[in-house]
Image: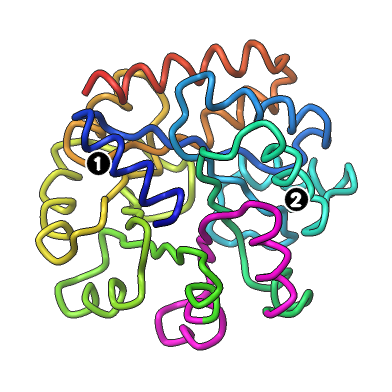
């Protein structure tokens, strides 16, 4: 059982929904980023999504793009991202970490070496947004063989014909993207999301979490009420981008996690 499996089993036993927080590794610098990441579990975060900085993040809106650029400007690399995860694991061996990003840095490092390094650093799962199911031999299947969950995205345009292919080799959880478009582009609505989540859950036993367009405690609660958990990224990254200290960022995260946990 992976850390992701164990976390959702624990939440299910408690009758609670998950709160997932996304932060960009190395934003605005390594030390500040590590301080924020280390503080996330204490702020009520059940699963950490750690963004891998990349120069061409096609699915990301301006907030995440700027965060990635700040991290790159500060010298963040794939190796340093894994080092950040490794440093986090010195104090926390239970909170799942999902590395989210694009395939190019992984391909450049070499899949086999990357998987060895990611596993050693304490990464539990991968979301690689530019690798469709047709490319599962490239990374998905090797990752699962190495003991890492490979998490697939479903979207409002994923129809009944496409969904089985999306779910085929997915493990850990399913991430439902609540809006059509880039991160931070619009707000999620529980009335729209609920039926879509129900449709996905009828086709899989995996937890279904919902991200994109969630930016307040109220929205976090509403979305978590119709899914297995809520994901917040851009709203948290905006706090970091505004130069707020880690303590203030984490206090904001706590309001969001309280919202999801009250669903």
Name which residue lies at 40% across and 80% down.
133
Vertical relation: 17 (above or below) 148: above
Whether 224 is drawn above or below 173: the answer is above
Few, some or many C-alpha atoms within 10 Å of disc 2 (few <14, some 14-19, many ≥20)?
many
Assign the C terminus to one quadrant of the image. top left
- 164 vs 151, left or right, is left
In the image, residue 121 above or below residue 89: below
Mark 1–mark 2 distance (CA, rounded to whole Å): 28 Å
Q: Nearer the viewer, residue 43 or 235?
A: 43
Residue on which the image places disc 1: 228
Q: 183 left or right of 197?
A: right
**Image position, residue 241 (x, y; %):** 70, 28
- Measured as percent of width and height from the top left, residue 193 is found at 20, 45
Give the x, y percent position of residue 180. Answer: 35, 55
Q: Quadrant of residue 28?
A: top right
Rendered image: mark on residue 44: none
For label 2, the residue is 81
User: Horizontal and vertical percent for residue 208?
Assistant: 27, 51
- The answer to whether 107 is drawn above or below residue 207 in the figure is below
Quadrant containing the N terminus is bottom left
Image quadrant in which you'd find residue 249: top right
Which residues lie in the magenta part? 112-141
Q: Secondary structure at mark 2?
A: helix
- Considering the numbered disc 1 on the image, is that residue within a helix, a strand or a loop? loop
Residue at left offset 73%, top offset 25%: 35
Contact between labelled residues 2 and 1, with CB atoms less than 8 Å apart? no
**Left or right: 72 in relation to 256:** right
Task: Using residue 157 as the reference point, say whether residue 217 is left or right of it.
Answer: right
């Amino acid at each position: 059982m992976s850390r992701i499996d164990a976390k959702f089993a624990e939440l299910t036993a408690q009758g609670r929904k998950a709160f997932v927080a996304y932060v960009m590794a190395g934003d605005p610098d390594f030390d500040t980023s590590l301080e924020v990441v280390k503080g996330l579990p204490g702020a009520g975060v059940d699963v950490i999504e750690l963004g891998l900085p990349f120069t061409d993040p096609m699915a990301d809106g301006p907030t995440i793009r700027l965060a990635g650029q700040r991290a790159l400007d500060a010298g963040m690399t794939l190796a340093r991202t894994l080092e950040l995860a490794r440093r986090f694991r010195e104090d926390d061996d239970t909170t799942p970490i999902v590395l989210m990003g694009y395939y190019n840095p992984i391909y450049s490092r070499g899949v086999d070496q990357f998987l060895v390094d990611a596993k050693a650093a304490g990464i539990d799962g991968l979301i690689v947004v530019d690798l469709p199911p047709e490319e599962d031999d490239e990374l998905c299947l090797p990752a699962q063989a190495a003991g890492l969950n490979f998490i697939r995205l479903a979207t409002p345009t994923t129809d009944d014909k496409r969904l089985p292919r999306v779910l085929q080799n997915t493990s850990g959880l399913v991430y439902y993207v609540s809006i059509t478009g880039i991160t931070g582009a619009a707000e999620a609505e529980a009335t729209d999301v609920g039926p879509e989540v129900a449709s996905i859950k009828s086709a899989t036993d995996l937890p279904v979490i919902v991200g994109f367009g969630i930016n307040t405690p109220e929205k976090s609660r509403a979305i978590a009420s119709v899914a297995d958990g809520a994901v917040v990224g851009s709203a948290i990254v905006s706090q970091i981008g505004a130069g707020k200290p880690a303590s203030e960022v984490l206090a904001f995260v706590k309001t969001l996690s309280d919202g999801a946990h009250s669903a």
